[in-house]
Structure formats: structure tokens, C-alpha cells
Image (cartoon, rainbow, N blue to C red):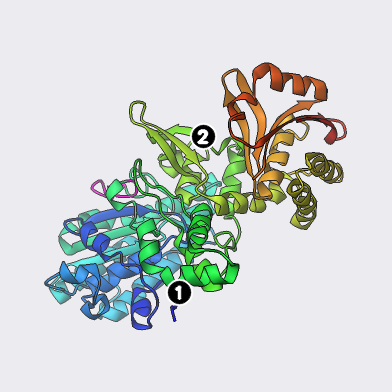
Amino acid sequence: MVYYPIGIQTFSEIRTKGFLYVDKTQYVYDVCHPGKFVFLSRPRRFGKSLLTSTFDAYFSGRKELFKGLAIEKLETEWKRYPVLHFDLSDIKKGTTEECELNLHSQLEDFERTYGCEKASNDLTIRFRELVKNISRKTGVQVVVLIDEYDAPLLTVLHDSARLEPMRTLLQSFYSPLKKLDQYLRFVFITGISKFSQLSIFSQLNNLNNISMLPQYAGICGITEQELKDNFQEGITELGKANNLTEDEVLAKLKLKYDGYCFAEESEGVYNPFSLLSAMQNKKLGNYWFSTGTPTFLVNMMKKFHTDLTKLDGSEAGADDFDAPTENMHSVLPLFYQSGYLTIKGYDPILSNYTLGYPNEEVKVGLMHALLPFYVVKDPVEARTAAGKMYLALRKDDIGEALEAARAFFASIPYQEGTLQDAPTSEGHFTAMLYVMFSFLNVYVYTQVRTAKGRMDILMKTDTTIYVMELKLDGTVEEALQQIDDKGYAIPYEADGRRIVKVGIRFSSEERTITAWKIKA
């Protein structure tokens, strides 16, 4: 029987209790030979904490835990180093007082472990002297591991008044690392976002950011080959439970959980948490969003007035979407670093990236999480309406689906605090329809470029391609005429699926769909 380590982030526990472990120890060895100051950014629930714990076990000289793994043949000394393993994931109240207290508490634990006296009440001095004293006492260099370094910052990212003092506090905490070079063997820092080395890590100008290096694209997550090598029993059981062949299981797993790409021209990886959960539960569910969309993401979408309909297929230069988080001018960097967007294409001549949703789970889960902010506060109402729309689309009845949408939108009072500033704009209604159709787990695109313009909505089901044009206070005839005049449907004529043109009229006064016309 296979035991899947869902929620278990400690390497020693996985290895001693017989849980499945996908061997990443080749990466562990490569990173720290000859690496010394290393930074890695990856989305939440992607194995960062497990990787950090693996470094902990490795530098602690626990050779027995690595039996049969790649690193066993690479490492010959298994030298033991004192390890200071910090975890900042619980510091989320957004106050510098809480953050400082938590860090002092962790330093106190290390002082007790290594028999060192408290050097000072000052956080910077206490950390600096602890490293020195441990190194002098043991006669070897110290390893410092910092997991979720940015958790305290993400809580206050949208609030500059609180962000600045939090950043100053953490900068003072990290500042000794550069001057402690002779006392340090290895420093590994991981988190979701990339904060500028000119601020948080101002002293660590030799910090090596491996987040987008192709050779480390698979350091977290599960590659296609790793899936086939390690999950054969789970694939078989998943197929039996869902009456699917092995090929069908692999295709569905790929569609739902694969697609994360962390460097241009690199292999995509699967979300490990979702993949393990699917194997354990024998069900292809949406697991990554089980704890909801992080509040900081929604707050940043409000701050930058994000147009949700333009995220998928967005383009950005390397400097734009990999910008330091506190200096970004759009939400794209955070969406990429958080795992909601990934690299879909790269133009080496222009150094330009195309970004998109990694997979079905992310897109549908994101739409579900954003329902209260774009459509209606109570997601139960939206699910009820979406259910009616889904049943209609299953019958290829777009008219019935739009009737359900019309009745639903008409019942929604305008709500302050949504992510749409203009509740009577065409963009607002486009976003509402986009969220609802995406929520139904169909392929939906907005503002699709053509040779003569941009169509409002393109929707693809298994049997039909819908080309939709929206008119705010206009006529459905005008909408259909635009589809024909601009040739919006022409690129899809060779697809083989039925093409249906749909003109839709929105009323700014009634704030809902008031008419539509279908042309098959």
C-alpha cells in the first residue's frame, strides 16, 4: 500500500514512516556545490518546506535517511553542520511586534539547542552573535535555512504604511548574513515572492536567485517522468475508481494539474499537493484552492484595478513579470510568483514572455474564489445559476444558458467593494460572463485578437465553438454584424466543431442581459 505524504513537510518523517518520496536529492546536491547563498521562489503548496527540510537533514549528516536516493552516490563525507532552520509561515498578523517576538522565540530555541547564551535583546545582534558562537563552539561553519521568508510581508503587501516597517525589521534581521560569510557554510532562503535585494536582502548582493534557471525548473513539483516512475499504483487505482483507462487518467491529470513552467523552454511540472491528493482520494478534485485564494492577492488586484479577462495570454518582458514584488506596477509578477499564471511562451528576440493559467484546476479554482468579488457576495447563488447554465450547455442550448445568466444578473444588487470600478461598463459585464462561463469548466477567452479586431468572448465546449459579441445599450443585430464584418468566426471554420455566433445586449440601466440573438 502506498502512503502519500499529504501535508507532511518533514523529510525525516517521510523517510522513516514509509511515505512516498519523489527523489529530489540530485537537486539538493547540485544547489549547494558550490552554492552558498541561494534564493528560490515557488508557489504555495509546491514543496518548498519539504525541500528546506531535506537540506536540513542533509547538512545534519543524517546519511541513513538518504539510503537509495541519488545523493547517496554523490556525497562521500556526510559532514555534520549546525543548522539554524527558521520558519516564518506563522507570522501573518501583520504587526512588527508579532514578527519580532516570533523571531526572538526561534533564536531562543537555537540558543538552548546549542548551549549558547543570549547575547542581546537586539534582534540583529542576537542573530549575529548566535551564529558566531555556534561556529566557534563546534569548530565548523553554520547552515542557515529560512522557509517562507516573505509570509510576514505578504500579509501587509497592499498596505504601504505597514509594509515599510515590516520590511525594515526583516532587513535588520537578515543583514548580518553577509558579514558572517566566514562562519557560514550555506544559506537557503525560500518563499512565494521575490522582494528586491536592494531592500530586504540589501547586504546579500551575492544571493544567487535560482528561481528561473532551467536546470532547477523541476526542483519542486512533479515532472512527467517522475509521475510515471513513482505513481504507477496510484494511476491504476485512480483509473479503477473512475472507470478510466491508464491513458485517460494520464490525460486528465495533465489537463488538471500539469503546466507549471518556471523557465523558458523548460519542462512543465505538476502541482505536487494536488497530485498527491488526487491519488490519495482517488478523485480528480480541485485541491489547491481548498483553503481559498490568499487575501493578499485579492487586495493587490484591487490596488492595481486588475482586468481579470486579460490575465490569460498576457504578455510581459522579463523585467516586468519577474520584478521585485514591492516595486511592481501590475499584478502580473505576483500572479506568476504565486502560481496563478505561468510561462506559456517566450520570444528570445524581444525577451518577451506570454503568460497564462497553468491548468484547469487553477483557472476554475480562481474563478470560484473570485465569485464574491466579481459577481455576487454569496457564492451559493452563483453555483445555483452556474448549475442551470451548465445543464443548458450540456444540451448545446446557449439560449437557455443566457436566460439563466440574465435572471441571475438581474437579481444581483450593485455592491460596493467589488473588483470592478464601473458597474455599468461593458468590461464589467464581460468580466461577469467570463467568470461564470469559466466557472463551468469550459474554455473561455476574452478580447481574442483577430486580423481585424478583438472579439469579446470565445467559448469552446466539446461540440461547439461560440463566438460572442457584447453591446452595451446597443442592439443584438449590431453585435452579429460586427462578428461577420470582422470575420471573428473564420479562424475556427476548420476546427470541425459547430460554430455558433451570439449577439448579446446588456442594459446599463437594468444591469443585466436584456436580449440576445443566435446565428448557427
Left or right side of 66 for 488:
right
Say whether disc 1 or disc 2 marks the residue closer to the N-terminus. 1
Q: Position of residue 92 (x, y in %)?
A: 52, 61
Q: Which mark is residue 314?
A: 2
Residue drawn at x 53%, y 40% as measured from the top left: 331
Above-or-below relation of 333 to 48: above
Q: Position of residue 28 (x, y in %)?
A: 26, 62
Residue labelled with disc 1? 4
Tell whether position 210 is magenta: yes
Q: Secondary structure at mark 1?
A: loop
114 or 374, nearer to the observer: 374
Above-or-below relation of 326 to 283: above
Left or right side of 182 for 325:
right
Q: Position of residue 453 (x, y in %)?
A: 61, 20
Q: What is the distance, in whole Å, between disc 1 and disc 2 at their CAs?
A: 36 Å
Q: Position of residue 516 (x, y in %)?
A: 83, 31
Q: Secondary structure at mark 2?
A: loop
Which amino acid type is shown beneath numbered disc 1?
Answer: Tyr
Which amino acid type is shown beneath numbered disc 2?
Answer: Ser
- Quarter holding the C terminus is top right
Above-or-below relation of 56 to 261: below
Q: Residues within 10 Å of mark 1 (few under 14, many from 20)?
A: some
302 or 29, nearer to the observer: 29
- Residue 317 quadrant: top left
Contact, CB < 8 Å: mark 1 with mark 2?
A: no
Left or right side of 303 for 12:
left
Q: Residues within 10 Å of mark 2 (few under 14, many from 20)?
A: some
User: Is residue 474 among the parts visible in the rendering?
Assistant: no
Residue drawn at x 72%, y 40% as measured from the top left: 433
Report the magenta residues as a range: 202-212
